[in-house]
Amino acid sequence: MPVEVIVAGLPRSGTLSMCEALTRLGYHKTMHMAKLIVNPTQMAVWTEIYGKHLEKTWTNHDWRQMFNQQFPEYVAVTDAPFCDFAVEIAQAYPEAKVRHVP
């Protein structure tokens, strides 16, 4: 599934509330760090992603492929680590709505 909504707010800035609001608005599969952190496998994946990002080797295709593999059912993302890559995710999914939580 393609990413439809990207919440580009930092942790502790209302992202969990946005996650719950998006769920109520019909985006029933919304990813937040609270869901990610309980899965050690996902944390290892994100360690690798940060490394590849620093190497500047990922393309839009790589981002889409990673999301399709790691989060196939999610249509919205909030909080870290997604906010760290909001620009890249938005470029990979130009049809997605981007919201900033100040």
Image (spheres, rainbow, N blue to C red):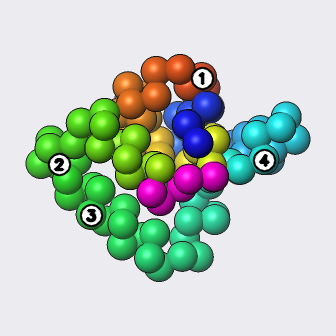
Q: Amino acid at mark 3?
A: Glu
Pick the quarter of the image with the N terminus: top right
Mark before the other along the chain sequence, 1 or 3 = 3
Pointers 2 and 1 in contact (C-beta within 8 Å)? no
Q: Badge 4 is on which residue?
A: 28
- First in sequence: mark 1 vs mark 4: 4
Q: Which residue is mark 2?
A: 54
The residues tagged by marks 1 and 4 sit, at their Cα atoms, a distance apart of: 16 Å
Check disc 2 and give the amino acid type: Leu
Q: Is residue 58 magenta?
A: no
First-in-chain label (2 vs 1): 2
Q: Answer yes or no: is residue 46 visible.
A: yes
Decide if residue 68 is on the left or right side of residue 44.
right
Mark 2 and mark 4 lie on one chain; the one further toward the N terminus is: 4
N-terminal-most mark, 2 or 3: 3
Q: Secondary structure at mark 4?
A: loop
Is residue 11 visible to us here?
no
Q: Would you call the spot at circle 4 few (<14 residues within 10 Å), some (14-19), or many (20 or more)? A: some
Q: Nearer the viewer, mark 2 or mark 4?
A: 4
Nearer to us of marks 2 and 1 is: 1
Whether residues under marks 2 and 3 lie with C-beta atoms below 8 angstroms apart, the answer is no
Locate residue 55, reporting x and y percent.
12, 48
Disc 2 crowd rating (10 Å Cα; few below 14, some 14-19, many 20+) is few
Residue at the spot of label 3: 48
